[in-house]
Image: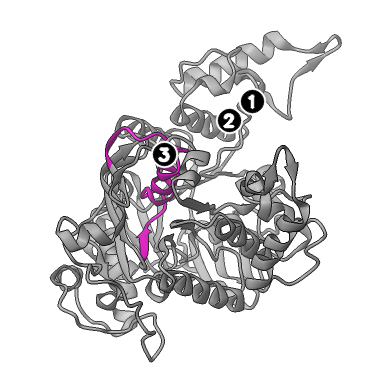
Amino acid sequence: MVQADEMPDSDKGFRAVGLVKTFAGVPALAGVSFALRPGEVVGLVGHNGAGKSTLLKTLAGAHSYDGGTLLLDGSEVHFADPSDAFAHGVATVYQELSLLENLSVKRNIWLGHELTSFSGLNEEQMSAQAQDLLDDFDLTMDLDAKLSAYSVAERQLLEIAVAVSKDCQYLLLDEPTTSLEAEQIARLLDRIRDLARRKNVGVLLVDHKLDELYDVADRIVALVDGRVIFDEKAADIDHDDVIRAIVGAGAEGDVEDESSALDAVSAHDGRRDGAGRGAEPREKIRRSPASATENPGSAAGRENVALMAEHISGPHLADISVSSHIGEVVGLYGLIGAGRTEFLRTMIGVEPMYGGRLTLFGDEYVPKNPADASRHGFAYVTEERKIDGIVPRMSSPDNVSLPILRKYTRAGVLSQSRLRAMTHEYIDKLKVKGNVAGPIEELSGGNQQKILIARALAQNPRVLLLDEPTKGVDIGVKSEIHSLLRAMAREGMSLIVVSSEEEEILDVADVVYVFVAGRTTGSPIPVDQLSVAKLRSLAWQQHR
């Protein structure tokens, strides 16, 4: 294994040596060492929560680090922020692109460093150099057209082109192929290879699709729980070795190869290994005779099914089949970009459904929009509470009441007293702490999350969809939310929970569907037959 502090021949390169980063005392990076050399493509892989995004943000100056050293061409560096890193030749392109859709292509290319003359902007020179950049990257774009006129793939290539045009020596790419189609992915990978070879740019590529990495990477680095498990030439390690390292079976003492792990899950043999769970299993929810593994096409199954989704397709979904029963918590697990969030958003009509069939409590259901979904009994808790969840300057009760104001309005008059009593009932039920009368943005992240769940419960849903319900909350609040979700299921609600944390899925769900590249991998798996290693194996199995 080549470590960052063992680089031969030259100091040229961008190195991390013993990099440490903690959040609330929990290590996200636990002594990471590796090197990125000019002209080299390094593939970075790891399971959900392994530390990949934290490492990228730390290298890019978005996070400070608590220990270790960053070296740039042999000299120690401390980036104050991403712009400082950029000034040193380190550019980062995240999944959420930073270019501005409402500006023209040319304005995006020159944003922040426009060329000027005595009379103002030097439009002629800016147009000429911008066109040269597009030509260099084989991009056919109208310089004066708004960026919104172009596909995600074209915007992504333009953002990479802009980064490289500004004397970028090291380019960090975070899951750049997640939203792209096959042709677009091939084009992007070709461009990454070309950048490394022709422009001598060092590229760090985070990607969970091993075929893509093997197509372009010179080396592959794997992170597990904030540590580098291996750092090898791609030619010297095969796909199965990568998967075995990522799933961490050996670390759990569950010494079985990937194929036997998959066989054990598929066989539904009822063995319990308890990985990732407490010493004593929690009491499982008692459901009616249609159990999680019962054929939903049977008479008993049909009577107890809340939601039946069959072969659902959409912009980011290829073939999704999921069923949820009354009184059941269904977990959806998969890697970033697998389609879990998109499935939930399709159920409430935010994303279009191209094909497939949906039934809700036995009746045909066609998603139209969130208001219609609410009328049919859905409630949805978003993953990004700050983006499309809370209204920051409104109070907590006002945030809770937003979807249900009509219920408390008669002849155009809102009953403030009834509405206030209802909102405070749910706020008290969830034990929200802090000044709930003030702006919700002043509450802690955990209490903001509780308010979003209170808003969902206030809608009196029959099917509750939760996307990463404990994202960004502390351990105590997470435990409270898990207990609440299980209690809601016991009361007869159907819950579908997306989580990237294996331990959370194993703790809160009754059955689990694994999503891979917009598809479900098979039938629901009872949680008693799963472990952290098996979940990871299933999620990675089709990315060999």
Residue 162 circle label? 2
Q: Label 2: few (<14), some or many (≥20) within 10 Å?
A: many
Tell me the number on the disc at residue 108.
1
| Residue 440 occupies quadrant | bottom right
Going by the image, does 49 lie left or right of 428?
left
| Residue toward you, 522 or 536 | 522
Answer above or below: position of 274 versus 490: below
Q: Secondary structure at mark 3?
A: loop
Please name which of the two marks, 1 or 3, marks the residue nearer to the observer. Answer: 3
Disc with the residue nearer the chain's start (3 vs 2): 2
Farthest residue in the front direction? 411
Residue 191, horizontal then vertical, whole percent: 40, 33
Mark 3 lies on residue: 179
Query: Disc 1 or 2, which lies upstream in sequence?
Result: 1
Residues drawn in magenta: 329-357
- Of 83 and 391, nearer the camera is 391
- Left or right, residue 471 beside residue 424: left
**Is residue 468 magenta-colored?**
no
